Image (cartoon, coloured by chain):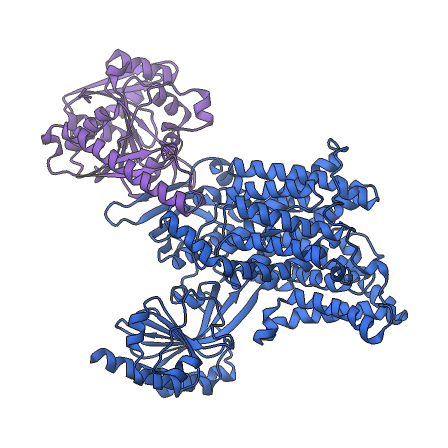
Chain colours: A blue, B purple
Amino acid sequence: MNKPSAIKTFIGDLPKNLFAGFVVSLVALPLGLGLAIASEAPPISGVIAAVVGGMVTAILGGSQLTITGPGNGLVIVLLSAITTLGGGDLYQGYLFTLAAIVFAGTLMFLFGVFRLGALSEFFPSSALQGMLAAIGVGILAKQLHVMLGITSVSGTPLKLLLLVPSSIQQLYLNASLEALLPAGLGIVSLLILVFYSRLRGPLFRFVPAPMWVVLVAVGLTYYFDLVVKSPYPVAENLLIRLPEKVLNNLPFPDFSILTTGPFISTVFSITLIASIESLLSIKAVDKLDPQKRRSNVNKDLRALGIGTTLSGLVGGLNVVTVIARSSVNVNNGGSNRSSNFAHALFLLAFVLLFQDQIERIALPALAAILVFTGYRLAAPKNLLRILTIGKEQAAIFGITLIVTLTNGLITGIGAGILATFLIHVAINRSLFLFSRNWLKPNVLMYKEDESGNYYVSVKSFSSFLNFYRLKGKLDEIPESEHAIVDFSLCEFVDHTVMEGLNDYRRVFARKGGVFEIIGLDAHGTDTQHPFAIRKTLPSNDFFKLGKNLTKRQISLQKLATVLDWEYRSELTSDTKELERFDYFKTKVVNYQYNELISKDNQFHLFDLSYTEGAFIAKEDIKASFLLVELGYSIPKFILDRENFLGGLNEITPYDDIDFSEFTDFSRRFFLGGEDAKSIRSLFNQELVFFFESHQYYRVESIGNSLLIKRRTRLSSIQEVKSLLAFSNELMAILNTRNNA
Amino acid sequence: MKKVHFKNILIGFAFSPNLKANVFEAMRLANFFDGNLFFLHVGEKTVAKEKTFLEILRNSPVNPKQINVLWEEGQPDKTILAQCTLHKIDLLLLGALQRENMVKFYLGSIARKITRKAPCSVLLLMKPSVERIPSQHMVVNAFESIQTETTIGAALEFAQALDIPKITLVEEISRSKVAVAVDDDRSLRKATLQKEKLNRREISRVNEILSRIPSNLKENKSITSQSIFGARGYSIGHYAKVVRADLLIMNAENKNSSLWSRIFTKDLEHILSELPTDVLIVQNKEDE
């Protein structure tokens, strides 16, 4: 790609990115305000962080799709800093914390300079999960009270959780409009957030859930102003206060306690958590990038460091890469860093233009967003998932969670690391294995001269302690190549490594390469989970076989018998390289089940679990798909029902191809693809008539395979039958065309 | 090209269960090279000991042209080194120890000391055996070093004498030579290109060395080369293990290994701490 065309692409993509930035800012505004309030900092400080951070990282950063701003992980650290550093004076504590943020930014910048982007690899995956869960509990515990309109409680997260029933009771005893309205608003807001993903109306979906919460909260004040014509019955301390002239009243950090212990420990906590949160997010966003780019994490760390320092100097919180907002960016068509910049500009505009409206947002509404965030972090589901990997992982998770809640983040993560190490020693009954080999190189990589494959052999043990060495080698393999990782000389492989390797497997699959793991057959394991300690990687059938079939499954089984097809009910991770299809470009495929396979292996009908977005913007989707292997090649195209705007309900790089001779078809269907000419020659009278006369299906061709899907949900037996009939007729037409 | 001979061969022996196997290996080796064999026992000479030893010698199916049995007393390492110099030894044989309950071999501290200071080439035997197990595949280092050419020559001579059919020359290219750090797609492409360039250069360097080696040494041998990017001295041992080679041939280190290099293990130290297979360390005498 040469320079001029890169600039042209940038300009061509600008409108798309401006739009994505706008949608992101709709999420970022409530989150920015909410996270700041949850940290007991002035609400505006969260927005400042997003504005400064967005601009700086958009210019200096090393990744394309990430959105930066104040992060969830920091809430707990900042909250304890602000409340303790000032000795009870929140504003003074805030000024001291700003100074800590300035230093943390510098430290983060240095992390980037010294290429410590691999830092996050040193943390055992289950300990990190435990830490995130603890952060979630911390946010949840405090904000549950605020959501109910009660701001007076304080204490440790565990104490706050125990106080929730008394807060509810207080509400019940003191049932006035002034008390019930904020609580009602908070609960309604939470319901909006919870049920948002169930509703799929395009107009409703245009506005992200957190913005709906804000709109409801602001709308309520106007209802009292204009309709009821009575003062808004919500106490002053439950409304947001912004400084009079935002730009003129920026606070300046107070550097007077630089050398004290709590200050220094705050600096380290902020740096550590901010780096970990950013690195994890960057890695996760790379998985969603339709263009499959690899982010330069060290460059990003440097940019985030500069952003954090600048943000701290003008009164903002620290800047991290945030996963939920980034995923919203990807799902709305953001394609490069200009969307991050745009999101910062829109936020600035909101604050300057809608100051009055922002001040109408009641805290319970924002607290509901945080409760939802905290719940997503701390959901019991996470613990159950880890339990399926192994009891020892659940123990690590539990230890980290509890120690973090009682003794703070740094001690918590330290306890998690120690627990993981001790468990590894206990499992191997050998400290020697680790002490003798920890500092030694243990990875060999070379390109086999005859086959051109990359061969990686790992010796002694492979765990979070030395995963960076293996990663360093794996990162040097272009993902479009064939890599073979051999563990036959390795005595012990831990969960962190297995999970990390699975990420590599996904990236290689996305970029057309092959990532194979061999030599684990001789390794024992406790559970069936693919990521369990020393266990073979997910190749096939790793989820437990369902013993009792549901009614739908029995019907599918009967259908298979009638058709003389094969039916497999079990969950497998064999996802047929679905990443090849445009449809899955921004989605992560989890597993498939209920598969029907035709005798000649041409038709594969299956239910698929996949996810869209990440974290609080994450949606788990299960839907039925039909994959048809053609055995010959046809042009690549995407065909789907046109939406009310005349486009496609997904991000696509293609323009709609319209036919002057088939006006009805062109009006009803979106047809796109790279090679418009050959698509036009494929869609003749017969094929167009076929599509016109049937139900709407989304049909995507990638040359020799077709992916056909009806709705974004599981199909009923009737729908399965009509889908099969549809595809049979379609194949008949295509086959005769091919033979002719 | 300087030539390394394996004419005078010395093996230290102790009265361990491995004695017979060690003696037989040494006898076979000396026979292959048509050389003089020196047996050295550091310790008291008794009639019983001598009787046992001579009994074993008598049972050997092969007999080199000259056998000398030396009985010396003193510190094992110093005595062995002194005797090596005294008898102008070319090749010293040392046995490795097996870690308890583990399939890993390592050198005892005395053997390590001797290996580091030996004035001659050293062959470290992992599993000496009474019956001959012919070697099939040798891995030879081909690092960019002045000693390498001699080592490769010696290796091929060794292969000729012991009839080893397969030889792989391994170039270890240290990571620091790839000046590009992989951060993102662009630097990855750059680094990959640079590696390919280095790889080609290494292959042509090795081919040049091979072209200078007399062709009678290369007859009936399958000689291949393989570039490895990784920590020097470590990767080749790992590689030998992965390809199940039965002999690894390395350059001797030109510097005395200091305490520093033993803490921050490098080059030979990695291999000495965990023998991947039998190892021959070729001493380039004229260097000194």
Q: For residue A663, which quarter of the picture? A: bottom left
> Residue at the location (26% across, 16% down)?
B287
User: Observer-nearest residue: A104 or B176?
Assistant: A104
> Residue at the location (32% across, 16% down)?
B81
Decide: is B118 above or below A401: above
Question: How many numbered markers are drawn?
Answer: 0
In the picture provided, is A701 more to the left or to the right than A736?
A: right
Decide: is A200 above or below A437: below
Judge whether residue A487 can be spotted in this image: no
Residue A11 image point, x, y percent: 46, 55
> Residue at the location (49% across, 70% down)?
A609
In the picture provided, is A91 more to the left or to the right than B82?
A: right
Decide: is A226 above or below A449: below
Residue A196 image point, x, y percent: 63, 71
User: Observer-nearest residue: B92 or B150?
Assistant: B150
Decide: is B60 above or below A17: above
In the picture provided, is A200 more to the left or to the right than A658?
A: right
Judge whether residue A297 can be spotted in this image: yes
Residue B50 image point, x, y percent: 28, 21
- Quadrant of image for the C terminus of chain B: top left
- Quadrant of image for the N terminus of chain B: top left
Residue A468 image point, x, y percent: 48, 43
User: Observer-nearest residue: A30 or B187?
Assistant: A30
In the picture provided, is A623 more to the left or to the right than A40?
A: left
Q: For residue B158, which quarter of the picture? A: top left
